[in-house]
Amino acid sequence: MPNLITYARKAANFTCTVGLLFASVQSSAIEFENYQLEGNPENATVMEYRGRPALQITGGRYWFSDMTLSDGVIEFDAAMDESHTFFGLIMRAESDNHFENIYLRAHLNKKPDAMQYMPVVNGISSWQIFSDQNAISAAKYDYNDWNKVKIVVQGDKADIYVNSNEPTLHVPDLKTDIKTGRLGLWMFSIEKTPVYFSNLQVRALTPDDKIVGTAKETPALADGLIRSFKVSEPVPEDTVGHNHWLDLDIDKLSWQSLEVESNGIANLAKLSGIADKANTVLIHESIETDKAEMRKLRFGYSDRVQIFLNGKLVFAGNAGWKQRDYRFLGTIGLNDAVGLSLQEGKNDLVIAVSETFGGWGWTAAWE
């Protein structure tokens, strides 16, 4: 098996030439356990913690400056307290805005979503889109002590071990389709408390390293699920509608087709990120009927939606994180419905989906 971890060290001074995708990143080098990490040195300190050398990080991303990863094994020990903290691994990064992400939620010890897999595409996270048992898992943490983390990546699959000899989470389908890219550590803490890393190891697969986890069974996709959508270029949210009517001329917008993910949800960020105030895309469906009739559309979205039928607003909602109560996550499912009064002949259904944080997604099924 070829070594799929590419090293780019210059032995004399342990520096490397960074590719054009990352050439504009201005950061300092931090040497730790024979690795060189690039990031903000104000938020990272090499020190001793609980009897061993450790890298204390209080926030940000820290890239391994001397390697890219395709398939391989990443191991580290991490120590943290029970504060509201997120930390983990960025891998196969094509750019600062496009990568695979595996992370732990320190404050959710033993909870069903203590750890998360998600792709980041066009700079937009997607945990509200990927929230089934193939993307989240419970994990048991030992606070203020060392927790063993091991990640095995092969092809489009990954096994993640946390204080366990069996996979804590198996990811059966890494979503970005990036084959190789940069590797990094990251963390964010609402309370500004640190995470300590130790015993870093990144290596190629050996014959003993295998993907052993299996995909969890998930509910069947809904009957009537719409599997492809016609999606517009992004527009500012405040230009979409006025006084309960659609303001935009949809014929002047550019459109692309987007297939849903394996869970039936369309990740709208795959077509575009958010630039300036352009945080909204339109989804257009033309419906032909030979008589006037009512149809029920079940749907889910994040973060906000406006649904227009023949130019008139028939539904508006906000399912953003914490927008309904302090525990509301905004994960996407077919949890809402609207009755559509269709006229004889052609009907234009336009859905405006706006994003702030956590996942730009839409799913729908006819019933």
Image: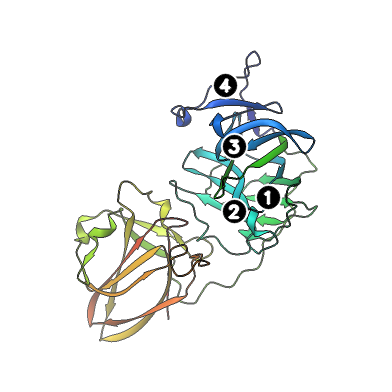
Q: Which quadrant of the figure has residue 228? A: bottom left
Q: Quadrant of the N terminus?
A: top right
- CA–CA distance in space, label 2 to label 4: 35 Å
Q: Are marks 3 and 2 in contact (CB under 8 Å)?
A: no
Q: Is residue 167 left or right of residue 345?
A: right
Whole-percent x and y of residue 50? 77, 39
**Can residue 364 be seen in this snapshot?**
no
Q: Which mark is residue 16?
A: 4
Q: Amino acid at mark 4?
A: Cys
Decide: few, some or many residues near mark 4? Use Cα within 10 Å; few <14, some 14-19, many ≥20.
some
Which residue is the site of mark 1? 81
The mark nearer the N terminus, 4 or 3, is 4
Q: Amino acid at mark 1?
A: Asp
| Vertical arrangement, residue 217 with respect to residue 276, above or below | below
Q: Amino acid at mark 3?
A: Leu
The mark nearer the N terminus, 1 or 4, is 4
Whole-percent x and y of residue 272? 37, 49
The mark nearer the N terminus, 2 or 4, is 4
Q: Which quadrant of the figure has residue 135? A: bottom right
Whole-percent x and y of residue 104? 63, 52
- CA–CA distance in space, label 1 to label 2: 9 Å
| Vertical arrangement, residue 15 with respect to residue 97, above or below | above
At numbered mark 3, what does the secondary structure look like: helix, strand or loop?
A: strand
x 56%, y 62%: residue: 131
Q: Are marks 3 and 1 in contact (CB under 8 Å)?
A: no
x 66%, y 54%: residue: 82
Which residue is the site of mark 2? 84
Q: Nearer the viewer, residue 259 or 136?
A: 136
The mark nearer the N terminus, 3 or 1, is 1
Q: Nearer the viewer, residue 58 or 64?
A: 58
